[in-house]
Image (tube, grey):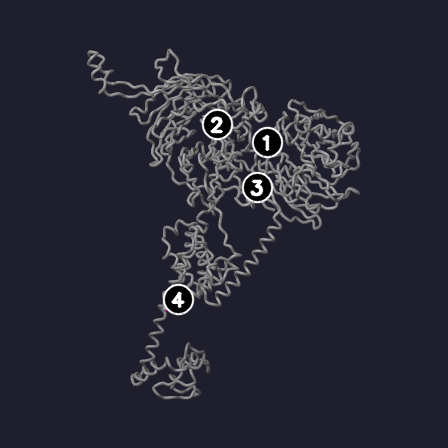
Amino acid sequence: WAVSSAHVPSYTGGKVVLCRGRGAKNLYGRKPIAASVTSAATASADGDGDAVMNEGDDEEGNASTGDDTEKPFLLAPCGGDLSLIDATRGVRARTLRTGCSTSHASTASIANYDEAAMAAADDDDGALDRDALTAYALAPNDTDLLVCSRDTILRQYDLSGSASSYGGELGGGPAKVRRTIGRSGHDLPVTHIEFHCSGIFFATGSVDGSVKVWDLRGGYATHSFRPPAGGRGGASAVSRLAWQPDATRLILAIGREDGSICLHDLRSETSDVPIVRMTDHVSAVTCMAWAGKDLGLFVTAGRDAIINTWSVEEEVIDTASAGNQQGRKKKKRRKDAASAPTTTKTVYRRVCTLPIYEQIEGMVVLPHYYHYHPDLVNTDIVIATAGSKGVVRVWRASKVDAKEGFEDSRYSTVGDFECVAEQDARSAFGEKRGGYLGLLRTSHRNRLRVSPSSHCPEELIAIDAEHNMSFLNLEGRTTGTDGMVEGKAMLRMDRTIVGHNDEILDLRVIPSVTPRSGDGMNDAGASSPAQKVAVATNSAQIRIFELGTYSCNVLDGHTETVLSIDVSPCGRYLSSCGKDKTMRLWHVESGKCVAIATGHTEAIGASALSRKLGRYDVGGKSARNGGGAFALTASKDRTLKRWALPGSSELDACAAAKDGEELSLRSLNSVRAHEKDINIVSVAPNDSLVATGSQDKTVKLWNSSDLSLRGTIRGHKRGVWDCQFSPFDRVLATCSGDRTVKLWSLSDLSCVRTFQGHAASTLRVRFLSGGLQLMSSGADGLVKLWTIRTNECEATMDGHNDKVWALDLHQDGTTFVSGGADSRIIVWNDTTKELEDAKRDEEEKHILMEQRLSNHLRFKEYEKALEIALELDKPRQALKVLTAIIENDVQKGQDSMSTLRDHVKSWPMSRTTQVLRYCRDWNTRARNSHVAMLTVKAIVSSIPAQTLAAADGVPELMAGIMPYAERHFQRLDKLYTSSYLIDYTLMSMGTMDDKVAEDYSTWEANQANKLVLPPTEVDGKVQVGGTVAIGGIKKKQHQDEESEDEDEVVTVGESESSSSESESDNDE
């Protein structure tokens, strides 16, 4: 089993930023281009198909294009780190400090989640992570990322997706720091960073109220602004920074917690003095924006529940006339007025105040909203707001000419704002849940959604208090009245990105509804619906995720935490129960609660629906009397209740009614089931039996018709957490806090199998593979696969860091979903067939490549053989090929490294690292050191040293090669020095007798052409040749040992007999 996809925590609160363009490349890391083994194996032996590397490969061994697809992304803080969220799929692609969390392929792997970073926000100040970020900003080019950590150090990152952006293999590691600018200079942590639209300047704001402007090119501060004296109550902390969106101007707006707003013109000589200071707000300023085509309006909002609109006007001041007003005549002033110097002054006048009766946390300007609303024109000022009431609203103000009574009637102003669109009440987050904390506007350049008209409309992204990001469609209008509520257009929610799930208590995979034969749908042409899963996340809401994109819909109706959920086998209905002592029945397609059951006196901890598909079509009186579908609930009051469900026609009609009330369910039976809390209730596939598991260590079987007791199963040593019926056999599987999974026979209630292996309590168990295997999850964070026949654990899946409370199987049996206390939802796929196919293909590939390698070696095609040996990762074959290449060059009279250098220059850095790793291992043996040293010399002489030093792993490999290389050189140096003794000895032997010196020279000259027999050993002496010619005299081989003519035999070494004789002579 392997991870197919996963939803991990990606947002824990704070500012969220959306990229402005199409996004970034290599968001999930660079994709390696695997060698086409099949085409290489079938290609001609002498053709171009023998080349293993592609011409487009870069220095890392990947295709130069890599993953060139630009993916739009969101930046969101996550426990002191920064998450990069794929805005299209809705999943976390990577984080700044830990790298990729899932790979781009279908067999994704989950990286270790930084639990320390997640807990840092809840820790005390002494144990806080000093590297945890407190503020960040993304430049307009979507590449330069500026981050400030808790220790007030500014760092710059590169998000372009190039090879230098991320570390690790194939760019899957953490982001590399491009530059460390240094400390920000603020006394307290930095909470706000904003870039100018040029991408050159950025401003930082701190809790101490100070603001600094920086030049990104040089990394230095250009301006510094302190809070003005006399603030309201000393609350001068910066709450908002905004730049005027004009590249030719440098005007910075600073909003503070005391409600004051200061605007500074950085091009002015007196930039430290604000050009205007506004004090009209009485609470923290949270939003500031310039509006209008000429940026002639300035809109501000805050937590004082009002929106102020300011007109931006330019006044011309005649400095000369101002100075000449004293003592000069009027005619003289008029004469010099044309040539007098003038200056312009920017004036902000408040023209409109809109009370909206909610604290504003997010506001964006919608310059193109007139395309989506029929009653708007392009001159209207349109803004969208989101705040504490949890409803997104769109406001419109029309431009009008200035009225009489204004000092200057040349300037136009705006009328009062009116609400023209509002979020749908069903999708609104609401005030009780905390409201919205931010609002973003997408661009057509993001291409997040393509409409049927093939254009990319804008959307709104609302960030709520539960860390969800809801995408609202601005095309809410319709031709009829369906899209209008009280004369306002509706903003429909398209999808939701869940940034953080709380502890997952239960989940169910919703079966896909199979179309009926009479629906007119062709099985071949009909697209399968998206797979969904319902999740209970330790809250009063139920979240329904769409697997793959992880878009989320919320079912809101419970008043307290939902503890258990179940889904009908048809996939149309969902039951939920929780601490509010009620059980609710939901219509999945409409998301509406259609029925409610009340009657328990304590929290309901388990619920189940009947499993027979045909029962849900039974309606009328038969259904009310218990002949149709039913629901079961088990509560902490230790009672088990059975509820009759209405027919599907009645339930669907209730869901279709706009103002219909929930149906009230009637309890058919109620029994006191256990002596302690009931943890689970399960229904048999044929609806004949009901099983309940409790903390009293027992499992009880009940008749589903009247809840009469059929039997009690005892055997667990601790409380039972789950029990499930087999879909085919008459057996029951249970799991308990005693760390075991047991299989029981329903005929005699005896234990058939016991599975042990979990290190903590076993929480969930499921049947799969037609009832031949079991899947269990435990408090140790592991999911185990058991084979019932062999009683063995076949696989262990480690993807969670905490208790795995939830586990459910897909109806196809090849996919299951797990969720736990670590807030993760992981989808697992059965990869048995894929692994077997891959193994078989790998074996075929190795056979073909080895055959080609043998053919190349046979025909002495060493260059091609070397590439294949490296591709197959065979160090021994590579050593043979390299030795043959060096010997071939020496035989041809060429440099021994000429061919090696040609190969090294064509290798990517990954291949060079591979060869250096081989050389490090070869160099440990003296017999292979010569080839290893020549290969290393060819590499270091062909590739620049700075390139090798920057490559991952190369410095460590060179450090491992150096000690053995020094040892080999010392050995060779000692051997070479000792060779002089042999030269001296041979020279001395040739000049012992002056009379035969000339004959010795002749013998030495002719010795090269003389045939010499293999050496033989006679009396411990090695003799070369049958006879030896010294001084022209030939003597026989066998002579007396006492003969004085010992020089007729050439002896190598010293025999024992000669040494013993010499010792005896010395003794005498």
Residue where numbered disc 4 is placed: 889
From the viewer's side, name the closer residue of 513 and 385.
513
Q: Secondary structure at mark 1?
A: strand
Q: Which residues are magenta?
A: 887-892
Residue 396 image offset from top left, x and y in percent? 47, 21
Residue where numbered disc 3 is placed: 5
How far, Cα to Cα, is label 4 from label 3?
Answer: 53 Å
- Residue 553, labelled with which disc? 1
- Residue 371, labelled with which disc? 2
First in residue order: circle 4 vs circle 3: 3
Q: Amino acid at mark 3?
A: Ser
How far, Cα to Cα, is label 1 from label 2?
Answer: 28 Å
Q: Amino acid at mark 2?
A: His
First in residue order: circle 1 vs circle 3: 3
Seen in the picture, residue 1053 relative to 281 is either above or below; the reply is below
Residues at discs 1 and 3 in contact (Cβ within 8 Å): no
